C-alpha cells in the first residue's frame, strides 16, 4: 500500500471571531493523484491550503507532507510545497529585490 504524500488527520480551524472554517477534516493524497478542492465561498478551501502550506495555524489536528509534520518539521515541509495564489498582491511600484 502506497503511503500518502499529504496526510490530514482531524484538522479543525476556528478563527478568533468564532467562525469554524474546518471541522475535523481527514484527507489523504497519494503521489501522482490529482485533487481539486471545490466548494462555495466560505467552505474552507483557502483555509485548508493555507494550513497545509504553513501560512495559518490549525486549531487542532495534524498535517504531514511526505511523512514530515508541518509544525515540528516546518523547514523540511516548506521545501516540499509550492503555492501559486490566484491573486498576487504586489503593488504597481513594489519590487521583488
Image: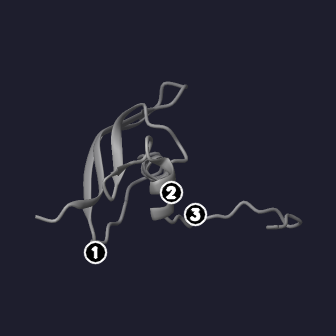
Looking at the rendered structure, the secondary structure element under dot 1 is loop
Q: Nearer the viewer, residue 40 or 81?
A: 81
Instruction: Say which residue label 3 marks.
Output: 85
Looking at the rendered structure, the secondary structure element under dot 2 is helix
Disc 1 packing (10 Å; few <14; some 14–19; many ≥20): few
Disc 2 packing (10 Å; few <14; some 14–19; many ≥20): some
Instruction: Say which residue label 2 marks.
Output: 78
Instruction: Say which residue label 1 marks.
Output: 32
In the rendered structure, the answer to whether residue 85 lies left or right of residue 26 reads: right
Q: Can you name the residue that lies furthest to the right here?
A: 93
Residue 73, given in percent of the width and then of the height, sits at 44, 47
> Pointers 2 and 3 in contact (CB under 8 A)?
no
Q: Quadrant for the N terminus, please.
A: bottom left
Residue 7, given in percent of the width and then of the height, sits at 28, 52
Task: Tell me if residue 18 comes above or below residue 52 in the rendering.
Answer: above
Q: Nearer the viewer, residue 19 or 65?
A: 65
In the rendered structure, the answer to whether residue 21 lies left or right of residue 31 reads: right
Q: Nearer the viewer, residue 78 or 26?
A: 78
Chain-order first, disc 1 or disc 2 = 1
How far is mark 2 from mark 3, CA to CA? Answer: 16 Å
Chain-order first, disc 1 or disc 3 = 1
Task: Report which quarter residue 61 is drawn in.
Answer: top left
Chain-order first, disc 2 or disc 3 = 2
How far is mark 1 from mark 3, CA to CA? Answer: 21 Å
Disc 3 packing (10 Å; few <14; some 14–19; many ≥20): few
Q: Quadrant for the C terminus, please.
A: bottom right
User: Which numbered marker is on residue 41?
Assistant: none
Amino acid at each position: 500500500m502506497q503511503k500518502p504524500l499529504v496526510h490530514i488527520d482531524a484538522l479543525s480551524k476556528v478563527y478568533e471571531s468564532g467562525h469554524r472554517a474546518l471541522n475535523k477534516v481527514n484527507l489523504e493524497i497519494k503521489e501522482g493523484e490529482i485533487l481539486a478542492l471545490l466548494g462555495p465561498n466560505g467552505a474552507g478551501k483557502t483555509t485548508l491550503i493555507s494550513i497545509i502550506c504553513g501560512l495559518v495555524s490549525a486549531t487542532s489536528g495534524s498535517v504531514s507532507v511526505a511523512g514530515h509534520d508541518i509544525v515540528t518539521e516546518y523547514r523540511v515541509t516548506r521545501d516540499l510545497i509550492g503555492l501559486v495564489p490566484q491573486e498576487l498582491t504586489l503593488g504597481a511600484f513594489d519590487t521583488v529585490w
